[in-house]
Amino acid sequence: MVKAVYPGSFDPVTLGHLDVIRRAAKVVDELIIGVLVNSAKKPMFTLEERMELIKEATAEFPNVTVKTFHGLTVEFAKENDAHLIIRGLRAVTDFESEMQIAQTNHSIEPDIDTMFFTTSLEYAFLSSTIVKEVAFYGADISKFVPPGVIRAFEQKKQAINGQQM
Ligand code: ADP
């Protein structure tokens, strides 16, 4: 029984994340997505919103669940009895920091390893940050995010407009 965790901010979940989730869910028995509570970052979507958006987008995968966590990823993995951490690699720019994180995690907890999925080419440029930027200026984001996230952006915009009136 191979259990893995896939940690990240997912602010919001993109088709790039979902590509990694789809592929990882095929090679492990159970995949737990860990939505990070990071007090240093100010997210656009609340923890609950981020979780709900992932849940909706991954409903088709029976072996995928979504949880929140704070603190060390290796602790989250241990609490869930997982020995594998999943991460996605987009470009060489991801490589250096991801390697550093993976090696640090492995030295803290030698029983836990990191498995990387290289991004599918069509999502190589895609990040939550880019999506937030282009969505803010009204661009069509349907090629980048699942339908629930498009809806969530529209609701955010309406809420902001409502406050400005
Ligand atoms: P973090 O704040 O931990 O980087 P993210 O939500 O930005 O969290 O990303 C979580 C993981 O998903 C990271 O391993 C990141 O490299 C990966 N990832 C993000 N976007 C993509 C993408 N377009 N294709 C493949 N992997 C991705």
Image (cartoon, rainbow, N blue to C red):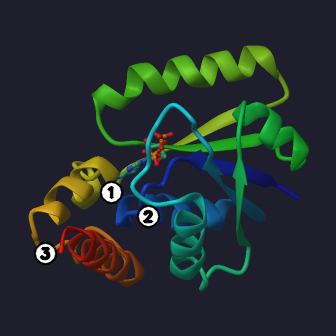
The label number, if any, that marks residue 88 in the structure image: none
Q: In this view, does 1 lie to the left or right of 99?
A: right
* Mark 1 and mark 3 residues within 8 Å of each other at the beta carbon: no
- Give the labeled residue for mark 3: 140
What residue sits 79% from the left and 41% below the top? 76
Mark 1 vs mark 3, CA separation in Å: 21 Å
Mark whose residue sits in front, 1 or 3: 3
Dot 1 or dot 3: first in sequence order is: 1
What residue sits 48% from the left and 27% below the top? 98
Q: Does the beta carbon at disc 2 come under 8 Å from ligand 1? A: yes
The kind of secondary structure element at disc 1 is loop
Where residue 142 appears, x then y in whole percent? Answer: 23, 78
The kind of secondary structure element at disc 3 is loop
The label number, if any, that marks residue 19 in the structure image: 2
* Mark 2 and mark 1 residues within 8 Å of each other at the beta carbon: yes
What residue sits 57% from the left and 36% below the top? 39
- Give the labeled residue for mark 1: 120
